[in-house]
């Protein structure tokens, strides 16, 4: 391919500078020849199919898309996508992805991880990737159990959870992944459900368009070791009253006549029923820079049994991306025209050195 034949770069913020594909693509173009090996009924199948169908919408060349995973059932993901990818080590996918995103501006970098992989051994890597706002997309599959190692409790398991590693019930207090992400000041935080294809795809599209770290928690059912963990938000008989849909600029309402209002006593939010006047409801503002209200919304899922949960984009704000800033410093240094560069060269070539003999 000659210089004049190179694909034009994408202009969407999250994909800016990445080369576009030469022509239309389909989900089959992103499906590898590997046999998919998950337990029958696993929610990972639905997420994989949604991602394979969504990737053509990016319009990027397959060679410029990378999926990095850690360890766990969901971390088999790179095998099943016909893109570049890496099945890395436990909890370290965000660190590896940070290096890749920083060194290769032309790549769309995605992380696939689970609640055990990301929130236990990988906790520090996860929060620092979000704090730095690296331009990568993190898909956190949350099934509230360790599936690959056959059913131990995880950092998101509810108190009292009886498993092989907690036969008398877990005494741990669980993480709320969305609350954690907002506390780390992630610029894009969302939650979706494995079985809701339409919503999942819309959230993936928004995450891809975002410039910076996007954390997407996906409620994902493990039919073998934690079946029905999200039954309330998935069952046709209960989901209307359990799912609190978050739509930017819209009053937060759910069920027949319920909604979310500002709690004047605490400054947080509260569930109200028998709503007759929607003007009393909280209007969702995903672009508000202050994450306080988004955090309050995330706390609505607290409790032992998940019976109600906000679903959607909690926060989407703009902040300079870490990798963009690093590359700008590198370019400045190479150009050699600023005082900053002189200081850098002075540091590198300075006399404060050691000789190892």
Image (cartoon, rainbow, N blue to C red):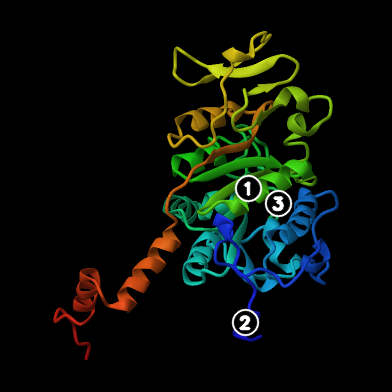
Determine the CA span between mark 3 and mark 2.
49 Å
Note whether 229 is above or below 120 in the view shown. Answer: above
Question: Residue 351 placed where, x, y %?
Answer: 14, 82
Determine the CA span between mark 1 and mark 2.
31 Å
Q: Nearer the viewer, residue 303 or 136?
A: 136
Q: What residue did someone put label 3 on? A: 147
Note whether 90 is above or below 103 in the view shown. Answer: above
Q: What residue did someone put label 1 on? A: 206
Q: Pointers 1 and 2 in contact (CB under 8 A)?
A: no
Residue found 46% across the figure and 35% down from its top: 291
Label 3 vs 2, first from the N-terminus: 2
Question: Residue 347 placed where, x, y %?
Answer: 20, 75
Q: What residue did someone put label 2 on? A: 4
The quarter of the image holding the C terminus is bottom left
Question: Residue 207 placed where, x, y %?
Answer: 61, 50
To which quarter of the image does residue 85 belong? Answer: bottom right
Label 1 vs 2, first from the N-terminus: 2
Q: Secondary structure at mark 1?
A: helix
Badge 1: residue crowd in 10 Å (few <14, some 14–19, many ≥20): some
Residue found 58% across the figure and 60% down from its top: 11
Q: From the image, state whether disc 3 or disc 2 is nearer to you.
A: 2
């Amino acid at each position: 391919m000659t210089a004049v034949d190179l694909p034009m770069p994408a202009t969407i913020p999250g994909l800016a500078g990445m080369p576009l594909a030469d022509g239309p693509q389909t989900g089959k173009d992103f499906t590898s020849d590997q046999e998919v090996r998950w337990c029958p009924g696993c929610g990972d199948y639905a997420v994989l199919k949604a991602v394979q169908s969504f990737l053509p919408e990016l319009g990027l060349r397959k060679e410029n898309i990378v999926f990095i995973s850690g360890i766990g059932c969901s971390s088999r993901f790179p095998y099943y996508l016909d893109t570049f990818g890496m099945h890395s080590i436990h909890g370290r996918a965000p660190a590896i992805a940070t290096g890749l995103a920083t060194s290769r501006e032309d790549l769309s970098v995605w992380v696939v991880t689970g609640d055990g992989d990301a929130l236990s051994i990988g906790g520090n890597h996860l929060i620092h990737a979000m704090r730095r706002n690296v331009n990568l997309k993190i898909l956190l599959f949350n099934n509230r159990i360790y599936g690959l190692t056959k059913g131990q409790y995880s950092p998101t398991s509810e108190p009292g959870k009886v498993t092989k590693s907690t036969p008398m019930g877990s005494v741990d207090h669980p993480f709320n992944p969305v609350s954690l992400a907002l506390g780390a000041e992630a610029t894009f935080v969302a939650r979706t459900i494995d079985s809701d294809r339409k919503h999942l795809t819309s959230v993936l599209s928004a995450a891809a368009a975002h410039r910076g770290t996007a954390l997407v928690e996906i409620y994902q059912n493990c039919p073998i070791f934690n079946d029905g963990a999200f039954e309330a938000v998935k069952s046709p008989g209960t989901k209307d009253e359990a799912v609190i849909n978050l739509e930017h600029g819209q009053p937060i309402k759910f069920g027949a006549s319920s909604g979310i209002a500002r709690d004047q006593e605490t400054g947080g939010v509260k569930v109200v029923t028998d709503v007759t006047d929607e003007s009393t409801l909280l209007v969702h503002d995903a672009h508000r820079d202050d994450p306080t209200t988004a955090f309050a919304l995330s706390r609505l899922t607290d409790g032992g049994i998940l019976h109600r949960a906000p679903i959607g984009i909690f926060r989407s704000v703009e902040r300079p991306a870490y990798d963009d800033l690093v590359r700008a410093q590198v370019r400045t240094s190479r150009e050699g025209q600023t005082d900053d560069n002189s200081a850098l060269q002075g540091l590198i070539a300075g006399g404060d050195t050691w000789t190892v003999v």
